[in-house]
Image (cartoon, rainbow, N blue to C red):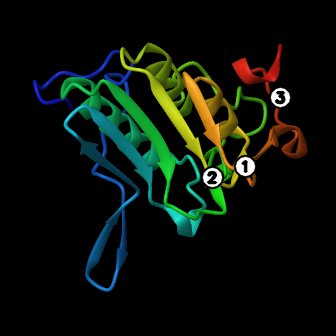
Amino acid sequence: MGANGKYFQGAASLKLRMPAVLFREDQVIALVSADFQSDTIGTITFKNDRKRNALSGDFIHELMKALNDMIYHPARVVILRANPGAAIWSAGHDVSELPKRGRDPLSYNDPLEQAIRAIQRCPAPVIAMLEGSVWGGACELAFVCDILIGTEKTSFAITPAHLGVPYTGPGSGS
């Protein structure tokens, strides 16, 4: 929820769960962190290096919450990034959460699709700072940002075809 208790359009229909965290020797680690610099620049950092920042439902839930917080703060610009030096910005959709065969893998209400729409509707410019590889659904997440900034090591791989999953997202050209 944002500071005024409202959700950014598109986030309200997400199933609310307890915050997604990893546990390691009595230490709680968030999957996503949100910080402000100079009170107007919001940075959302992907922190789940162990799972290559895979876009699980829990990860996306935290991403949407952080984006809501940025909007209601309000941020004048939002930056999406992985931890500095990451080899993979995001490994895309968490394939262990894909639906069974015969169902649309990314229906309109899928959390990844909701996150993509939330970024598209964000009133502040969203900048993707891309370091490392960007795979599958993460390509779509990056492509809907207003500005993409990459390093010489940034690469893209639209991988659903390797899994036998049809891909018709905005980044596919269809």
In the image, residue 130 lies at what x, y percent? 61, 45
Q: Which residue is pictured at 27% across the width and 50% down the height?
A: 18
Badges 2 and 3: C-beta atoms under 8 Å apart?
A: no
Q: Answer yes or no: do the residues labelled 1 and 2 have beta carbons within 8 Å?
A: yes
Q: Position of residue 120 (x, y in %)?
A: 50, 17
In this rendering, would 6 be left or right of 80?
Answer: left
The circle on residue 106 is none
The reply to whether callout 3 and callout 1 are in contact (CB within 8 Å) is no
Mark 3 or mark 1: name the one nearer the start of the chain. Answer: 1
Q: Distance of mark 2 from mark 3, alpha carbons?
A: 27 Å
Label 3, label 1: how many angstroms apart (C-alpha)? 24 Å
Q: Position of residue 174 (x, y in %)?
A: 83, 13
Residue 9 location, quadrant: top left
Compare marks 2 and 3 and give the one earlier in the sequence: 2
Residue 16 placed where, x, y %? Answer: 30, 38
* Residue type, label 2: Glu
Residue at image mark 3: 166
Number of the front mark, 2 or 3: 2
Residue 131 numbered tag: 2
Q: Nearer the viewer, residue 129 or 28?
A: 129
Amino acid under label 3? Pro
Numbered tag placed on residue 154 in the rendering:
1
| Above/below status of 9 relative to 148 | above
Q: 166 left or right of 19?
A: right
